[in-house]
Image: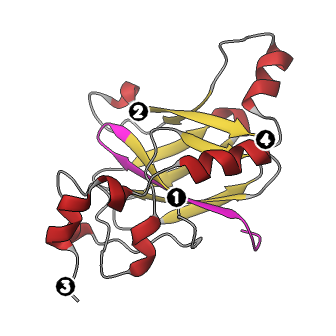
């Protein structure tokens, strides 16, 4: 991906997508599969200080006009990251991180006008038959104007701040 790309981690699991963004430091913290549990679904490694400002929203937001580098992984079985409106697709393979980059060029608001569909939303889907609830692996994607994207990012709370009690039992003691 070009230097300065927005980096976003996408993780597939039966039967959902989750995304993780870097915080103000611009770095997504490390993870380890052995750290995955019911609370820490990404397996965030608290030995890495870059993890402390990462955030995990319920929607995938992308900035219009800026390259986006998606770092992809799977927790369990083969999934496939499919963003049909962007014509991009990449497998999410357990134990083998993959990635791709692209540049969104039409915001969600612009696409609604262009299609004359006020209810239109971009989506992330799974195109790998990954089990019984495969059909449920859909995730809302919002393409924001650059200023709106930065405002949205600034409004997000870090995962650590939302799970302080949990982190206090897992973080290394100083």
Identify the residue under disc 4.
Answer: 145
* Circles 3 and 1 in contact, beta carbons < 8 Å: no
Do the CB atoms of the residues marked 4 and 3 lie less than 8 Å apart? Answer: no
Residue 8 located within the stretch drawn in magenta: yes
Disc 2: which residue: 137
Q: Is 115 on the left-hand or right-hand side of 170?
A: right
Pick whichever of labels 1 and 2 is earlier in the sequence. Answer: 1
- The local crowd at label 3, few if under 14, some if 14 to 19, many if 20 or more residues have their Cα within 10 Å, is few
Residue 74 in the image: above or below residue 3: above
Q: Give the alpha-carbon distance from disc 4 to disc 3, as whole Å.
A: 41 Å
What residue is disc 1 on? Answer: 21
Can I make out residue 36 in this image? no
Between circles 3 and 2, the one closer to the viewer is 3
Which residue, given by chain and number where applicable, does mark 3 sit on? 173
Magenta-span inclusion, residue 155:
no
Whichever of callouts 2 and 4 sits on the residue coming sooner in the sequence is: 2
Frontmost of labels 4 and 3 is 3
- Dot 3 or dot 1: first in sequence order is 1
Would you identify the image quadrant in which residue 107 lies? Answer: top right
Distance in Å between CA atoms under marks 3 and 2: 38 Å
Q: Tell me the element at label 4.
A: loop
Mark 3 or mark 2, earlier in chain: 2
How many residues crowd mark 2 within 10 Å: few (<14), some (14–19), many (20+)?
many
């Amino acid at each position: 991906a070009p230097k300065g790309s927005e980096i976003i981690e996408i993780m597939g699991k039966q039967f959902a997508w989750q995304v993780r963004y870097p915080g103000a430091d611009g770095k997504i913290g490390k993870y380890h599969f052995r750290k995955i549990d019911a609370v820490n679904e990404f397996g965030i490694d608290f030995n890495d200080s870059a993890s402390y400002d990462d955030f995990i929203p319920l929607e995938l937001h992308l900035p219009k006009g800026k390259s986006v580098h998606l770092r992809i992984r799977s927790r369990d079985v083969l999934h496939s990251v499919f963003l049909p409106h962007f014509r991009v697709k990449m497998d999410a393979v357990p134990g083998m991180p993959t990635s791709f980059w692209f540049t969104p060029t039409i915001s969600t608001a612009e696409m609604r006008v262009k299609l004359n569909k006020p209810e239109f939303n971009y989506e992330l889907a799974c195109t790998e038959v990954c089990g019984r609830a495969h059909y449920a692996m859909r995730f809302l994607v919002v393409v924001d104007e650059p200023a709106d994207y930065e405002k949205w990012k600034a409004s997000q709370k870090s995962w650590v701040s939302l799970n302080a009690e949990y982190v206090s039992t897992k973080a290394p003691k100083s």
